[in-house]
Amino acid sequence: MTTKTAVISFCRLLMGLALVVSSIVNGYKLRYHGESFKPDIVLRVTENSIPVACSTRYSVVINGTSPGPEIRLRQGRTYWIRVYNDMETQNLTMHWHGLSMAASPFSDGSPQASQWPIAPQYFFDYELHPNVGDAGTYFYHSHVGFQAMSASGPLIIEDDDPPYQYDGERTIHLSDLFLQTDEQIETGLTQPPYVWSGEPSNVLVNGQGVLLNPGADTGDTECSLATILVEPEKVYRLRFIGATALSYVSLGFQSHNNLSIIEADGDYTQPFGVDHLQIGAGQRFSALMRTKSRKELEEDRANGINHYFLQIETRERPDSVRSYAALIYPGGSYNVSTAPANPPMILPSTTLGWLDYQLRPLTPNNFPTLAEVTRRVTVTITQIVNNTLVTFLQNGFPWTESFPPMPYLVALYNEDLSLFPSYESAINNGGMDNRTRTFPAKLGEVLEIIIQMTGAGNGILNVHPFHAHGAHFYDIGSGSGAYDLMQNEERLKGVEPVRRDTAMTYRYPGSGIPGVPWAWRAWRLRVTDAGVWLVHCHILQHMLMGMQTVWVFGDRNDVLRLGYPAVKGYLSYGGEAYGNSSRWPTCVHYWDDDDD
Ligand SMILES: *[C@@H]1O[C@H](CO)[C@@H](O)[C@H](O)[C@H]1NC(C)=O
Ligand SMILES: *[C@@H]1O[C@H](CO)[C@@H](O)[C@H](O)[C@H]1NC(C)=O
Ligand SMILES: *[C@@H]1O[C@H](CO)[C@@H](O)[C@H](O)[C@H]1NC(C)=O
Ligand SMILES: *[C@@H]1O[C@H](CO)[C@@H](O)[C@H](O)[C@H]1NC(C)=O
Ligand SMILES: *[C@@H]1O[C@H](CO)[C@@H](O)[C@H](O)[C@H]1NC(C)=O
Ligand SMILES: *[C@@H]1O[C@H](CO)[C@@H](O)[C@H](O)[C@H]1NC(C)=O
Ligand SMILES: *[C@@H]1O[C@H](CO)[C@@H](O)[C@H](O)[C@H]1NC(C)=O
Ligand SMILES: [Cu+2]
């Protein structure tokens, strides 16, 4: 038995840190993850030249592939996921997108907020505990630099007893392909002279794609469209994952235009019929699709139709990229090495405010009314363009990988309680404590958060899919111009909003005058879960350009509840909570407290 268990007693906690005068009743256990410790899931991350969409790209990949393997977890259990950084020089983290509440405090995978990155040649054991009610569609991805362009994979929380009936599931993981290296893109965006990444050369389905302009491009590797195989007369749950770096896509299936949305970002919805979907970076949907009857297939085949396409088009960018996957029935066929010569469908241009005020939760979700709102916080986003760089600011400040110099939660533990935000100063400053650049809130508050976009420095406005780590927010809609509380309250009459973790701010027509309110997205949030949570645009480029904020929920005792000395191994880069080939890690067991 090599397991070493150290129970951290209340007394030692008090001795270790006088400032944590907390009411911790359960001591957290430290466990030595020696040879006998078996993680539930292992992911190995490398950098490789991979063949992708007829080209080759040096990419960060998970278990050798992009996307990485699909992970399926059950509700109400504790999982340990060991992530190896097998890269030579790059840092790594893994974020469990949409499931932050299911991750223990140092397991959320954001290097700016919750943990030191996993150094090259080290590994880290992430502890997750999906709660009952979390069943749904998620994904995991690196949170370092531009790595998530390729380093992501589907994460499904299974439901023992789904409220909808279906015969099968298909995962449709969407990602962008930029042929420049991550480093080129990162350097271009963060170091003078500013160089924009340009548009993706492809939108991949389950990592696959073909040349979109044969003749113009020359491919040097084999490639094919993704194939979605289905049987006739069945109902499939299609799980769409918006793992794109930049793209906001519109998509639909040729000749299968009756989709019924049943899930958005991990929460079931009442069925909502659509003929196409719009998916931004970080968003997920499940839709039921009934496949064709045998008779319909026979008729189609008599007319020479023996395959159908999933057609995908990027939106709200200077150029639209179009890509495909093939939908194939038994006996059908398609030469998947080519894209169709002509687009088989006309997909609508962007529907502004798509599904806003329309989706309903499947079961009542405790939506906070206006009367329950205790505080309103407006995050005003501006863009600064100068000769050398383009930067996004939230209430005057950017948050990047180089600010702060230490992951914020780690910094708080690591001596510097002066870094804990001042609630009073935040209240007097529109919600942000501008010394720490964070947005603090007390447990029990009901926040209304308004993401207020303003015209950009260069007069061009983008769409921004805003993602919140931590608890999911109640999405109360979006609109153009400045948020108007009473006007929106009018629109919310009779509406029971759904909870989301990623929602769009749209690009409304007009010319964006720099600094003038242009478009907004609003949320309500019951502040129940203590922690340090990122709220950021999920466009990887924009994150690098500063479009991120940090929220601190709870007081010191809540946020720093693990206490010393349990956390010691997490407080330095390469600390004892991180293992390598000559050292097993020592980890806090936050949920899993088996005594074996
Ligand atoms: C990833 O690869 C490792 C071996 O390299 C394997 O042990 C592990 O099971 C794989 N993970 C998944 C989720 O398939
Ligand atoms: C990895 O992270 C550490 C700690 O933040 C940092 O000092 C180092 O420069 C990073 N390495 C790379 C290659 O970014
Ligand atoms: C579309 O799907 C819904 C629910 O799945 C069903 O009730 C409706 O009849 C379908 N409509 C058509 C035209 O197939
Ligand atoms: C598929 O298309 C490619 C490119 O046009 C062609 O080279 C290949 O021979 C085709 N394969 C089949 C089986 O028809
Ligand atoms: C340009 O903006 C960057 C980022 O905000 C800043 O660091 C730099 O000092 C600015 N340069 C000039 C010349 O204003
Ligand atoms: C920070 O906020 C205070 C008000 O709390 C304000 O007086 C001060 O000017 C702000 N500083 C900056 C740099 O915005
Ligand atoms: C493993 O980590 C320890 C502590 O950081 C370090 O001293 C040792 O050199 C590392 N071993 C390898 C093989 O990197
Ligand atoms: Cu953005």
Image (tube, helix red, strand yellow):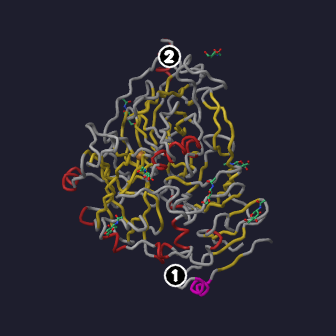
Q: Name the residue under label 2.
A: 341
Measured in 3D between alpha carbons, the distance from the residue under mark 2 to the one under mark 1, in whole angstroms, is 66 Å
Query: Given the current orientation, which residue lies at the most extreme front position?
Result: 387
Dot 2 surroundings within 10 Å: few (below 14), some, or many (20 or more)? few
* Total marks in image: 2
Q: Residue at x 57, y 77 (%)?
A: 563
Q: Where is residue 437 in the image (x, y as percent from the top left)?
A: 41, 64
Side of 392 relative to 411 (left or right): left
Region of the chain picked out in magenta, as a range: 9-16
Pinpoint residue 277: horizontal percent, then vertical percent. Answer: 40, 36
Front-most of 363 and 172? 172
Q: Is residue 258 above or below residue 454?
A: above
Amino acid tagged 2: Ala
Counting from the top left corner in percent of width and height, residue 168 is at: 54, 39
Is residue 21 placed above or below 580 in the rendered structure?
Answer: below
**Residue to which mark 1 is pinned:** 20
Which of the numbered marks, if any, corresponds to residue 299? none
The residue at the point 36 percent across, 71 percent down is 444
